[in-house]
Amino acid sequence: MAARELNTIAVLDRELLLVAVGGGSETHLARRAEHGGRAAVEHDDDVILPAVTDDLDGVKWEDTTLCGRRWHGMAPGPDDLTALWQEAAFAPTCRGCLRIVDSWLPITEAPPGLQLLASVVAERVIESSSTFVNGIPGQHLEVARRAIRSALRSRGYRSNTHVADDVLAVWSDDAYNALDRDELRASAAVAIEGIVAGDVSGIPVPAPSIAWSTWVADE
């Protein structure tokens, strides 16, 4: 059995353990414990090599995640063979944990063109209920998300966002509910008829994603 290693990330010199809480697929974060705490994994001689168990047990972690939930075990890393039914966790996906980590980072100034980008994204979402922005630099993801949601809110639309790598997905249930139902039914009918007839030329093509570099000038 291959040895297990701590599955951690470092943020501003803070070591954080990637953990699972059970009952969902999200990956959370736990801080090193200053007092007390628990080991990353439970001791099991049948699964973990004793020499590595000492290393894992030597570092203690807070009993709850950054977002306040109790966790049941370290999330498997890329070379972890002890939980073959689980996908390896490379980064946190819990929004609550990510918000707390974001609060530690220095606030970046909005680059020139961001408000224009936010306006373009808002109009696209109002037209089709969702869109994607690609190529956003990591340090600008949070400020871009806030600007876009603010632009939609100023137009009377609530919205949601999701980040994956350098792509920001934006959608709004309010915008979808405001779309003309007759047009939606007509588009769906055209699509179905085209598929049945083997001719997809008349099927509406979704608008391409919006490129960050087209609208924003990074200094």
Image (cartoon, rainbow, N blue to C red):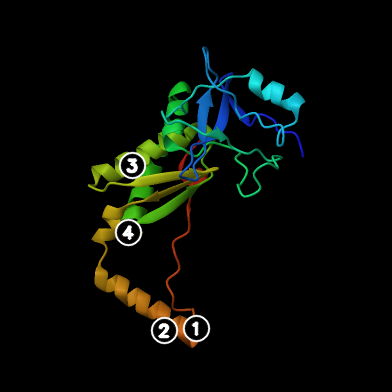
Relative image position of residue 101 (x, y in whole percent): 47, 27
Q: Which mark, residue 53?
A: none
Mark 1 nearby-residue class (10 Å; few <14, some 14–19, many ≥20)? few
CB-based contact (under 8 Å), mark 2 and mark 3: no
Query: Would you name the residue on which mark 4 appears?
Result: 127
Mark 3 nearby-residue class (10 Å; few <14, some 14–19, many ≥20)? many
The amino acid type found where label 2 is placed reads: Glu
Please state, as top left, top right, bottom left or bottom right, where the N terminus lies in the image.
top right
Mark found first going from the N terminus, 4 or 3? 4
Mark found first going from the N terminus, 2 or 4? 4
The amino acid type found where label 3 is placed reads: Arg
* Distance CA(mark 2)–CA(mark 4): 24 Å
* Distance CA(mark 2)–CA(mark 1): 8 Å
Q: Please tell me whether mark 2 sits on a helix, a strand or a loop.
A: helix
Mark found first going from the N terminus, 2 or 3? 3
Relative image position of residue 34 (x, y in whole percent): 52, 12
* Distance CA(mark 1)–CA(mark 4): 26 Å
Q: Residue at x 50, y 21 (%)?
A: 62
Query: Would you name the residue on which mark 1 appears?
Result: 199
Task: Identify which residue, 15 or 101, lies in the foreground.
Answer: 15
Q: Which mark, residue 193?
A: 2
In the image, residue 16 sits, relative to residue 83, either above or below, namely above
Q: Residue at x 44, y 61 (%)?
A: 207
Residue 186 left/right relative to 112: left
Residue 44 left/right relative to 177: right
